[in-house]
Image (cartoon, rainbow, N blue to C red):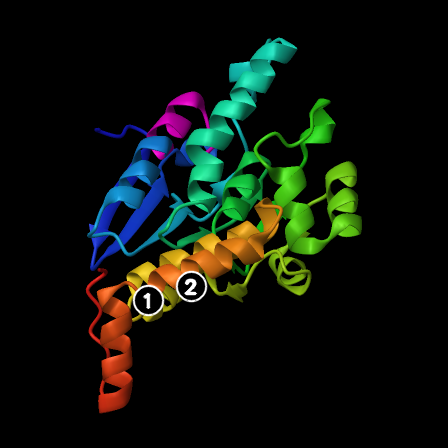
Amino acid sequence: MEYQNLISEVKENILYITINREKALNALNKDTLSELADVIAFAGKSIEVRGVIITGAGEKAFIAGADIKEFSDYSGKQGEELASLGHDKVFNAIENSPKPFIAAINGFALGGGLELAMACHMRIASDNAKLGLPEVTLGLIPGYGGTQRLTQLVGKGKAIEMITMASMINAIEAEKIGLVNYVVPQTDLISRAEEILNTIKLRAPLAVAAAIKAVIASINEVDGYTTEIEEFGKCFETEDFKEGVAAFVEKRKSVFVGR
């Protein structure tokens, strides 16, 4: 698929996705969401991809929200369908991907942009980042998982405060409350994300995928312990487990193959 709103490139087993609508502050419109759905599906299936970095074009915005004009005249039913499709194809697809996704937040991450960042497994913010969910100023609420994921990350009280006040917070505050993992100078944003993924790339790919699945199950399933037990057992059947044990015994570095 040829993308009109994204730049997508794989380098050294890392998939770089850049939302490329700088003049619109990288706002999410229907076409961009459709392209994101396609590239996220590719990431999950590609053996070459070991991790993903999502960012926005330019220095002003990661993603400054959804394109409001596109759904300003929607009915309630259409609104539900919009949210449901986005959850399935993009936001939940990121969270449930076996590949680690890192959001590299440069500038504004508002509304759907912050929701996309929260769907990623980790978040790194530049020191000029501003984050918030302003939907109630439009008579809406977050519809792409924002009410759920923000609560999971920062707790009920802080989530209700941020959503109902519709106020932005800076990167330092976001790190303080656990909304982002790290804050770095903007010039170091991508390199810090690469540093994390390059470390993960040294680990067993199937074990990384199993770990992500088990952690997400702790939030989204009734009994995450069962998922952990099942995934733990599956790891014993992999070539990578045998290699990891052999390397430990032989006091050498493991060479994992993802099988």
Q: Residues within 10 Å of mark 1 (few under 14, many from 20)?
A: few
Label 1 secondary element: loop
Q: Residue at x 48, y 65 (%)?
A: 185
Q: Is residue 87 visible?
A: yes
> What residue type is disc 2 on?
Phe
Question: Would you say residue 29 sits in the magenta stretch?
Answer: yes
Q: Give the main secondary structure, helix, strand or loop, of the magenta stretch.
A: helix
Q: Which residue is drawn at 32% across and 37% down?
A: 41
Camera-side residue: 49 or 137? 49
Q: Which residue is drawn at 69% across and 24% down?
A: 140
- Percent across and percent down for residue 218 are 58, 54
Question: Would you say residue 228 sits in the magenta stretch?
Answer: no
Q: Can residue 123 be seen in this view?
A: no
Left or right relative to 189: residue 222: right
- Percent across and percent down for residue 252 are 22, 87
Quadrant housing residue 258: bottom left
Left or right relative to 153: residue 195: left
Q: Residue at x 62, y 39 (%)?
A: 146
The answer to the question of whether label 1 and label 2 lie on touching residues, with beta carbons closer than 8 A, is yes
Quarter the C terminus occupies: bottom left
Task: Work out how far the residue at label 1 is from the one at label 2, CA to CA, in angstroms.
Answer: 7 Å
Quarter the N terminus occupies: top left
Q: In this view, does 163 lie above or below 157?
A: above
Q: Residues within 10 Å of mark 2 (few under 14, many from 20)?
A: some
Tell me the residue that label 2 is attached to: 232
Q: In this view, does 189 lie above or below 146?
A: below
> What residue type is disc 1 on?
Phe
Camera-side residue: 143 or 189? 143
Tell me the residue that label 1 is attached to: 236
Q: In this view, does 117 lie above or below 191?
A: above
Magenta residues, as a range?
Answer: 26-36
